[in-house]
Amino acid sequence: MSKILKREDIDNKYKWDLAPLCADDTQFEKEIAEVLKLIPKIEAFKGTLGDRVSLLKCFKTEGEIMLKFEKLYCYAQQKSDENTADNTGLVNSDKASNVYSKYCVASSYIMPEISKLEDKYLEDLILDSEFADYDVSLKSYIRHKKHTLTEKEEALLANGSEVFGGFSDIFNMLNNADMKFGEMADENGEMVELSHSKYGYFMTSDNREVRKNAYEKMYDEYKKLLRTIAQTYTGNVKKDVFVAKVRGFDSALERSMFNEEVSPVVYENLLANVEKALPVLHDYVAFRKKVMNLDEIHFYDLYVAMVENSEMKLPYEKAYELMKKALKPLGEDYVNTLTEAYEDRWIDVYNNVGKRSGAYSNSAFGVHPYVLLNYEENLDNMFTVAHEMGHAMHSYYSNNTQPYEKAGYTIFVAEVASTVNEVLLLRYLIDNTTDVNEKKFYLNHFLDMFRTTLFRQTMFAEFEYITHDLCEQDIPLTSELYSDAYEGLNMKYYGEEIVHDEYIKHEWARIPHFYRSFYVYKYATGITSAITIAYNILEQGEPYVKKYREFLSSGCTLAPTELLKIADVDLTTNAPFENAMNVFEKALNDLKNLF
Ligand SMILES: [Zn+2]
């Protein structure tokens, strides 16, 4: 591995084509100015929403503006993610945020005005065929009435939206652009610059010294900024608590669950069932230590494969083809669209100087979805591709089936489609190898998927629960408090066998998802649902795939837990959780039996 490439030195076919969103920066200027001009149109309906015709026009205008805006917003965001240090990208993305804030202010009267309308009147509109595209919104208005403030207060909150997002912006800027982790020797003794994606790669290195160095070097940098990061995170927590309180919720968590339209029972089910299964996770850690033949097992020993597999270098093309084969049970149409995504450059593949770290899928209605990667040639990264393509395909099906107003699915179901793909890929690999060593390797990966997606994310969820709870009790939040709480959770989840060193208790400081509160538990419920779905796809075939396709195409037409019921998953019961835990335990036993 050499130095990180500059963007212009990467072949075009590995870079996404943003033209379907917007031709270029000049066009962006022009179109964003047009959207800005449309905004007063939405204000014109103020005071008239009690009138049926006027309300319908208002909804249509909202759609018209947002459809145009969404594309520009995605363009600006993605362009800026190509190189976070580039000023034009930053300015454009700032402009888009600014326009959005203006739109929010201009439309902030809508919610309070509709809230004043009688339930009966709104319920009648839901049955009116002219309002067919807006029934989900109308139901949501009825649901949110209790937590809607006066027009003046709503306007005030809308005006503050940009400021509220500031904590996350500060952290991202610090984390992606300003923090530097220095150079270190890789496996070949070559000096390379440590970046987020290199860190992820080094954690899977067979060379323990490399893992240890990357780990310590990374955390040393976070330790230097611990107080600043704690302050930034606290700001974010306080923002959540403030908004929840103002809107009349008992807690930030309650508000989040309400917004998601998910029963708190689901959250309780997750925490309780994961806690029950922690002895199996402890057993797994102990088994890992034994197999790796270590005196002490550290956190930097958790990501490397327990089984040596030097063959596992996976160039992007090969990984993509393998993924397509594994996803064949999802049908021809699904696989053909994956080919289209590859050929039509939906995907930004490799890391370059200044590029945003991590991976995501993004979509604007009316244009195909996009995927950002920082591809490194290993198995983990192949799973990331499958994961993000799962998101992309979910958007693709919903966008092509539902009207704009009902196409956007909520975060809660978002992590299901992505994880189903990962599970299918893994099952494919496990079932199609006759090589014992390879089988061990994949089972190991399957177990780690549970560890990172189910256990680790539930631990994160518990951390968020604690920090918000402490804030709600008016307990001053400090970096020490965060690190202590985090250390306690590490002990509980990973047990005594692993060394709880000087570094890992500060891990909270480098998790970008904590700036999107109560997001991560959805990874855990996502994999829980995905296990049931993937096994049903493999066992029941076509009739079940139809149900799953219906789920993917349903956007936000139902509450998330109801959507999952289309695919035979009921998270308000213990069944899917127990099912997932059994699969984890069985995989651990399968692996043990191969040694
Ligand atoms: Zn995801």
Image (tube, grey):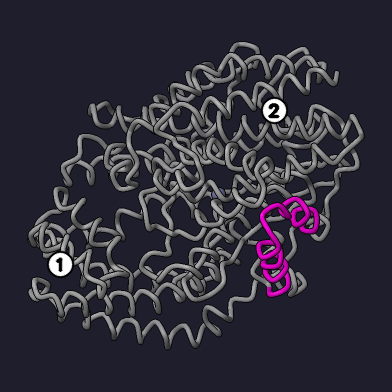
Identify the residue at horizontal 75%, vertical 63% (top origin): 5
Is the residue 276 above or below the residue 508 in the image?
above
Residue 208 placement: quadrant: top right
Q: Closer to the observer: label 2 or label 1?
A: 1
Q: Is residue 323 magenta?
A: yes
Residue 111 placement: quadrant: bottom left
Identify the residue at horizontal 86%, vertical 43% (top origin): 312
Q: Which residues are magenta?
A: 319-344
Is the residue 291 above or below the residue 4 in the image?
above
Instruction: Report the predominant secondary structure element of the magenta stretch.
Output: helix
| Visible residue check, residue 369 | yes
Q: Are marks 2 and 1 in contact (CB under 8 Å)?
A: no
| Visible residue check, residue 102 | no
Residue 316 placement: quadrant: bottom right
Secondary structure, mark 2, is loop
- Residue 109: mark: 1
Q: As shown in the figure, which amino acid type bears the numbered disc 2?
A: Leu
Q: Residue 537 location in percent, x, y? A: 64, 45
Q: As shown in the figure, which amino acid type bears the numbered disc 1?
A: Tyr
Secondary structure, mark 1, is loop
Identify the residue at horizontal 55%, vertical 19% (top origin): 277
Q: Position of 229 compared to 491: left or right?
A: left
- Residue 421: mark: none
- Residue 302: mark: 2
Q: Is residue 336 magenta?
A: yes
Q: Position of 378 compared to 96: left or right?
A: right
Identify the residue at horizontal 49%, vertical 37% (top origin): 525
**Mark 1 Cα shell of 10 Å, populated few (<14), some (14-19), many (≥20):** many
Per the model, the C-alpha gap separating discs 2 and 1 is 51 Å
